[in-house]
């Protein structure tokens, strides 16, 4: 997206078009569009002091795809869990087809025509698709018990009708994630769902599977199923939704027809200010090889091979992005490079240093900065202050300690400088890191790992769970590290992030690099195909 000439944005008004809710764009025949299927009025829910949903009102019409867009923690799952009877509202009403009776539990929700596909599937892996369909079918509206033969023909019928290719006799275990999700959707449809809730369905999918799912959603809407679709990816919202509700801190901060908006306006609504989505960067001028990974093998926690003959070189002054569906060895690779996980075989060198068997301490002192995937577990000590977290690897060294005595003034001064430079929003540097928002936590990690000017910066999922404003900031900093001569290894499950940041891209599948390319030659579809193991 070109951001060179920013046009003025309309003010972000709550309920932009609330007076005139847009009828579905899906163009239903027969004039059924307009019938309100789900209506939520003044819904509120708190968990202790956290107000997860505040006075939320929204509507979904028949055959309409409505997106719920918002950062992590905005309250999206809480909202839909109340529609599905998993959580009881503190106040407000949920009415389904005009019936405002309390939804007691998921069984009740299913009986009233609500289907939900959770991010973590509820299928029994050792059973076939048809067998899974039989489970829990007592709750089918209209009753009736399914035998296996009936279940098989139901799968075939529904898959043909909705274009959801699934083999009824395949064992769920053997199916790729995208197909397992289709089974979940079929299961909901077999229970005659009028409204399908999809909570972050694309988080686990490859780009191809995502596009397939978006296609399926459109078909379902065309045949009259309503869909509530949760995502934080703007592209997906714009591709399928008729309308979008933007949630921020538990409240609806905007409602708009997708035809009347664009990515930038949606991003602005999410964070409450304008953001730049594209990254400006000069072409890379790579220098000498800094990181060399040769035929690396690493096991996962279950002692299965996760990294399987991985080889890659990263030079000074370039960003190499590792693209891949999560679970293809990326986590184990990064942990091995950071000295946190044992290498089975192969070699890792940083310049002249062999780091194959180095521990995290030695890796750090060799000049490796590491922005870990799980900042709560590996990046920060939540109970320590921001100031202490900023010197976590150097607390016993000059100038932060002298002859074994901590130098508080130096620690504080370092923190004040970095807080300013990295825009860490907090009440002060003595605030505990655990009390910061996701974006600000990540800025503390980024500040610490970049402030010692690493030769190699490893960034794993650097913007996961981070608000759009902080994403932009962190991206800019990563490019600055590159421009200052660092070799940067970026690992991300977000293909858009890989495409916009990287100078070179390595696609990983099954623990090995299956293709490498210059980012400027990269093609989204091609990468998606490679990520899916098709090479
Ligand atoms: N069961 C729970 N107990 C306590 N806090 C919760 C619970 N569920 C959600 N929250 C909090 O409510 C807020 C909204 O969470 P959630 O609805 O999961 O957001 P989203 O799905 O948009 O990421 C967050 O601050 C979250 O930590
Ligand atoms: Mg959620």
Image (spheres, rainbow, N blue to C red):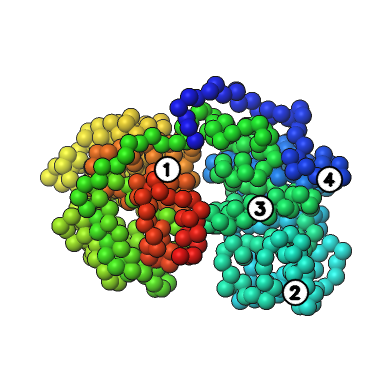
Q: Can residue 85 be seen in this view?
A: no
Q: Which of 485 and 355 is in front in this view?
A: 485
First in sequence: mark 4 or mark 2?
4
First in sequence: mark 3 or mark 2?
2
Q: Residue at 87% of width from left, 64% of height from top? A: 142
Residue designated by label 2: 152
Q: Residue at 68% of width from left, 55% of height from top? A: 216
Q: Nearer the viewer, mark 1 or mark 2?
A: 1
Q: Can residue 226 be seen in this view?
A: yes
* Other residues around mark 1 within 10 Å, as few (<14) / some (14–19) / many (≥20): some
Per the rendering, the mark at residue 500 is 1
Residue designated by label 3: 215
Q: Residue at 30% of width from left, 34% of height from top? A: 418
Rendering coords of residue 399 (x, y %): 17, 39
Between the C-alphas of marks 4 and 3, the distance is 19 Å
Residue designated by label 4: 29
Is residue 173 found left or right of 56 in the rendered image?
Answer: left
Q: Which of marks 4 and 2 is in front?
A: 4
């Amino acid at each position: 997206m070109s951001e060179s000439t920013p046009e003025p944005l309309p003010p972000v008004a709550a309920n932009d078009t609330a007076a005139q809710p847009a009828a579905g764009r899906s163009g239903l025949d027969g004039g059924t569009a307009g019938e309100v299927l789900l209506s939520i009025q003044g819904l509120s829910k708190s968990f202790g002091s956290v107000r997860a949903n505040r006075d939320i009102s929204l509507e979904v019409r028949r055959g309409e795809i409505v997106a719920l867009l918002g950062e992590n923690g905005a309250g999206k799952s809480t909202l839909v869990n109340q529609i599905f009877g998993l959580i009881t509202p503190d106040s407000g009403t949920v009415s389904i087809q005009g019936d405002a009776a309390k939804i007691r539990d998921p069984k009740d929700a299913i009986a009233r025509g609500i289907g939900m596909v959770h991010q973590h599937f509820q299928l029994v892996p050792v059973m076939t698709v048809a067998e899974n369909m039989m489970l829990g079918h007592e709750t089918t509206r209209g009753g009736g018990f399914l035998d296996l033969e009936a279940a098989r023909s139901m799968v075939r019928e529904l898959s043909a009708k909705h274009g959801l290719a699934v083999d009824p006799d395949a064992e769920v275990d053997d199916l790729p994630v995208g197909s397992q999700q289709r089974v979940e959707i079929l299961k909901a449809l077999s229970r005659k769902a009028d409204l399908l809730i999809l909570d972050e369905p694309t988080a686990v999918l490859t780009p191809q599977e995502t596009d397939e799912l978006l296609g399926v959603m459109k078909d379902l809407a065309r045949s009259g199923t309503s869909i509530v679709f949760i995502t934080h990816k703007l592209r997906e919202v714009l591709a399928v939704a008729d309308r979008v509700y933007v949630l921020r801190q538990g409240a609806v901060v905007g409602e708009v027809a997708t035809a009347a908006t664009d990515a930038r306006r949606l991003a602005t609504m999410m964070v409450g200010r304008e953001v730049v989505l594209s990254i400006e960067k000069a072409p890379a001028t790579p220098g000498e090889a800094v990181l060399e990974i040769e035929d690396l093998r690493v096991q996962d926690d279950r002692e299965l091979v996760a990294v399987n003959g991985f080889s890659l070189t990263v030079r000074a002054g370039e960003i190499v992005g590792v693209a891949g569906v999560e679970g293809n060895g990326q986590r184990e690779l990064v942990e091995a490079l950071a000295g946190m996980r044992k290498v089975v075989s192969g070699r890792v060198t940083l310049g002249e240093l062999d780091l194959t068997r180095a521990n995290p301490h030695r890796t750090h002192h060799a000049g490796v900065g590491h922005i870990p995937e799980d900042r709560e577990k590996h990046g920060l000590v939540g109970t320590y202050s921001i100031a202490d977290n900023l010197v976590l690897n150097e607390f016993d060294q000059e100038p932060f300690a002298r002859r074994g005595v901590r130098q508080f003034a130096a620690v504080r001064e370092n923190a004040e400088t970095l807080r300013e430079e990295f825009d860490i929003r907090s009440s002060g540097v003595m605030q505990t890191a655990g009390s910061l928002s996701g974006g600000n936590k990540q800025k503390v990690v980024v500040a610490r790992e970049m402030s010692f000017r690493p030769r190699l910066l490893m960034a794993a999922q650097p913007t996961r769970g981070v608000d759009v404003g902080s994403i932009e900031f962190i991206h800019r900093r990563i490019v600055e590290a590159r421009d200052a001569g660092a070799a940067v290894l970026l690992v991300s499950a977000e293909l858009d992030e890989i495409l916009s940041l990287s100078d070179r891209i390595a696609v990983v599948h099954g623990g090995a690099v299956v293709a490498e390319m210059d980012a400027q030659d990269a093609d989204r579809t091609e990468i998606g195909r490679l990520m899916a193991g098709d090479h």
